[in-house]
Image (cartoon, grey):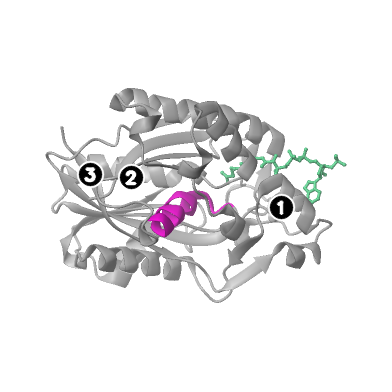
Amino acid sequence: MSGIKIRGTGRFAPAKIVTNDDLAKIVDTSDEWITTRTGIQTRHHCTTETHTDMCVGAARQALENAGISPEDIGACVGATFSSDYLSPSAACMVQRGLGLPHDAVCFDLNAACSGFLFAIHTMECLLAQAPRKYGLVLGAEILSRVMDFGDRSTCVLFGDGAGAALVEWGANYPSLHAVLGCRGNSEVLYVPGVNTAAPPHVHMDGQSVFRFAVEAVPRCAREVLDRAGLTPEDIDLFVFHQANQRIIDFAVKKLGIDPARCPGNIERTGNTSAASVPLLLDELVGGGAITSGQKALCVGFGGGLTWAGALLELA
Ligand code: ACO
């Protein structure tokens, strides 16, 4: 069996921190409503930082933490729907920013909040054929640029940031046992594209997405465990997409796991879509909560509607 392991992680958080009270000055909301309904207290918003700055910053940190040089990279896959350009891709901008080899396979994919896990599975497949065995996987979003700051039901939920993982392919490494899926739906969660006159703002029917999420997260986690032939007891940490603390609490309860094994950072990040899982992973790796040889079962869900789960192991 061949697969990938994580050799290093990195992140970039824009300097500006926006509190719930800050948002209450521009929309009819309150710290009390946001905290009790979502668990979010603060989020980061870009000011002068670009999407490219965030991606290059997070990727550079992942390379440094892994002790790998840019010339060793065989592929770079970015997960995002809010990059600086429709083209070139964020991954191409990372190629330029870090001087990755010209034959490294660099491109983006869009699976909204599930994007990082779609990207890491794609990387697992790509590296088997790539010119070198190391790959960079990025999740990055500037969601403050696709918010309608007159819509209190969405603008309080999202934040900006980027996370990166430096992965290594090995002929004897374990599979990610990835589970990916989608149920095409442009009604409950969508962002208009360039072919409409509407501004590119996130539109969301929160309750429908909530119902979808509390079913999808535990189902996806169980499917990954079944594929790997493991039980929840074999997992060191559960890393779930940080969209709403209540969704995470539901999933933890349905899976019957100790909440202490499902850490989060939503209170400080809000929902950063594709950046959410790698940002949290980097915090956990940096803080020593996940160490070499340990397994993290990661699950994402979001626009598409998409869902994704994978078993990540630290080299
Ligand atoms: N401040 C104060 N009141 C608010 C706010 C706000 N920011 N937003 C909505 N309300 C009001 C509503 O108007 C409504 O008022 P009413 O009862 O007078 O009509 C009331 O609060 C309740 O609204 P609900 O939508 O029922 O609130 P709910 O408890 O469902 O919470 C939330 C809303 C937080 C959006 C929740 O549904 C949720 O988290 N859904 C999932 C979102 C998600 O996970 N998205 C991830 C994917 S995102 C991506 O992929 C890009």
Report the residue marked by disc 1: 35
Residue type of the residue flagged with mark 2: Ile
Q: Regarding mark 1 in the picture, which secondary structure is present there?
A: helix
Q: Residue at x 49, y 48 (%)?
A: 263
The dominant secondary structure in magenta is helix
Residue type of the residue flagged with mark 1: Thr
Q: How many marks?
A: 3
Q: Residue at x 47, y 54 (%)?
A: 275
Q: Residue furthest bottom?
A: 48
User: Does the image show residue 111?
Assistant: no
| Residue 286 pos. (x, y %) | 37, 62
Residue type of the residue flagged with mark 3: Ile
Of labels 3 and 2, earlier in sequence is 3
The residue lying toward the viewer, choosing from 217 and 229, is 229
User: Nearer the observer, disc 3 or disc 1?
Assistant: 1
| Residue 119 pos. (x, y %) | 36, 45
Of labels 3 and 1, earlier in sequence is 3
Q: Regarding mark 3 in the picture, which secondary structure is present there?
A: strand
Distance from mark 3 CB to nearest ligand 1 atom below 8 Å: no
The label on residue 120 is 2
From which residue to which does the magenta span run?
Answer: 271-284
Badge 3 local density, few (<14 within 10 Å), some, or many (20+)?
A: many
